[in-house]
Image (cartoon, rainbow, N blue to C red):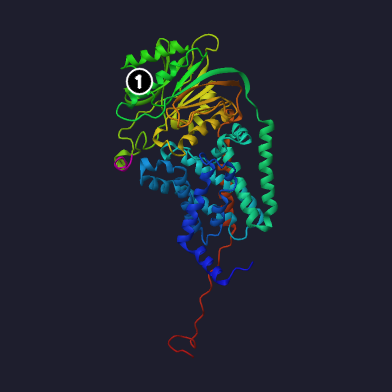
Amino acid sequence: MRVPAGRREIWGRRSTSPVWRGAAAVTAGALPALSFPEPGLWWLAYGALVPWMLLVRTAPTGRRAALDGWLGGLGFMLAVHHWLMPSLHVFIVLLAGLLGLLWAPWGWLVRLLLGGRPSPRRAAAALAVVPSGWLMIETVRSFEGLGGPWGLLGAAQWEVAPALRLASVGGVWLVTLLVVTVNTALTVLLTVSTARTVAVAGLAASAVAVTSAWLWAPRPEYSGQARVAVVQPGVFGGPDSVERRFDHSEELTRSLAGRDLDLVVWGESSVGHDLATRPDLAARIAVLSRQVGAEILVNVDAAGTDAAGRTGIFKSAVLVGPNGPTGDRYDKMRLVPFGEYVPARAALGWATSVGKAAGEDRRRGTRQVVMVLPGEGRGGLRLGPLICFESAFPDMSRRLAGDGAQLLVAQSSTSSFQRSWAPEQHASLAALRAAETGRPTVHATLTGMSAVYGPEGERVGAPLGTDSGASAVYELPLARGTTAYVRYGDWPLYGALAVLAALCAAEGVRALRRPVPVPPEPPVHTARASAERPGH
């Protein structure tokens, strides 16, 4: 059908309008967020970047492509973290704008390799370079001070079994490379008619990689079971909420007596007082441990003193047995920016006046801890605790698995974000950590969602949703063996860095070989053509 000339003119104006392009870039950048829970459109991730890349490749200049990359990054960060708006208010826009700058070089790369009419050779290079550029963005923004690895594109595949097998080989990073490679190949397929064979080859190579991981990557060696109970008290408000929540957790735990348990897990901030200064609370938990016949892993969020004599507010996983605290304690090492501390508080302390930023910085732990459950029979189970935000960091669970942990336990609380995407997004991360390490993972929260995953990232039992205050018992398969990711670490990051270094070297060589333009010779002025005597 022929488009009327008037409509073509309107479309042309819109496509070159800076305002239109900016709005389109923000919208296209936000689209991948739909692949994460709660919408959970995981399949969308494999094409969600295509509109953004189609826009960037048509940028008239490299500067405009970088701007489109930045605006798309702004849209992505806002969409993935929109649930923080009630806490940070307008500050979230500033943070998203700063982090969005990481995508500016990526936009420039997309235009460099796919802009205009790229040759098959450039299109083939794009299949390696564009995903590598995206992975470098994820690496940089994964630093704790920049918000941590929340919303990594590969994390959207948390319930896809082949992708979880790929995670056991190269972590969530390898899954991200797969997703962006497929998006890049689809972009080439749609726009570069001379390189469609290259695009099909890229898609085929991606399929072969996933199939190879599925067939040949080492699988966990199952070595028994552990019975673990999760206690989720639910939402409590008001000035006495801490005490009432403790009371309800106590009641729910008491109901687990006689269930032949190995461990009971309470959520983050389940105890609001330091057990060293409140022996009455420690005694109540010890009584519960005797009643259920298992140790109880609680989480203390209170001012106290650690083993090194430091005082301040700590978030600590504390193991309590029949005789009281066992001495096993882990202090949270990686804190949530603005939620648990304010970076550069002297300069950014004003954030506390416009949102719910931390009024006082919490203290950091100094090392990770593997706790060993005492007792006979299934006693001796080694568990690796993580607290809230830390379950987003692949390197922390990898370290625990390498140190001998047989079970990973993440204690969390998303009570401030109950009616948002945050609870489901957070719970989904435990599936990735389980698949990466080959260790079952428990994600226990105060208010939901609590969920449990087996050594291959598969869900075990039914989760506890955000609308329930309850307890549940899970039979977890334990596993031996070491995954390729635990053994070899973040090798996809180094591979991506090598690809980008090769691109820089190639561009540098090309620049050196490019002939230097010779300036034109100045015109020769004669006496007859001089300014003083025109025409002579």
Residue ID for mark 1: 308
Instruction: Identify the amino acid type marked 1.
Output: Ala
Placement of 205 over or under 481, stated as above or below: below
257 relative position to 501: left or right? left
Q: Mostly what secondary structure, the magenta segment?
A: helix
214 relative position to 41: left or right? right
Q: Is residue 348 visible?
A: yes
Quadrant in the picture for residue 173 = top right
Which span of residues is magenta-colored? 350-355
440 relative position to 214: left or right? left
Q: Nearer the viewer, residue 88 or 63?
A: 88
Placement of 317 over or under 217, stated as above or below: above
Q: Give the class, few, some or many, for how many residues have Cα within 10 Å of label 1's Cα (few <14, many ≥20).
A: few
Q: Nearer the viewer, residue 371 or 30?
A: 30
Is 314 colored magenta in this rendering?
A: no
List x then y, in percent, for residue 217.
Answer: 66, 30
List x then y, in percent, for residue 355.
Answer: 33, 41
Q: Quadrant of the N terminus?
A: bottom right
List x then y, in percent, for residue 517.
Answer: 55, 66
Q: Can residue 499 be seen in this view?
A: no
Placement of 6 over or under 183, stated as above or below: below
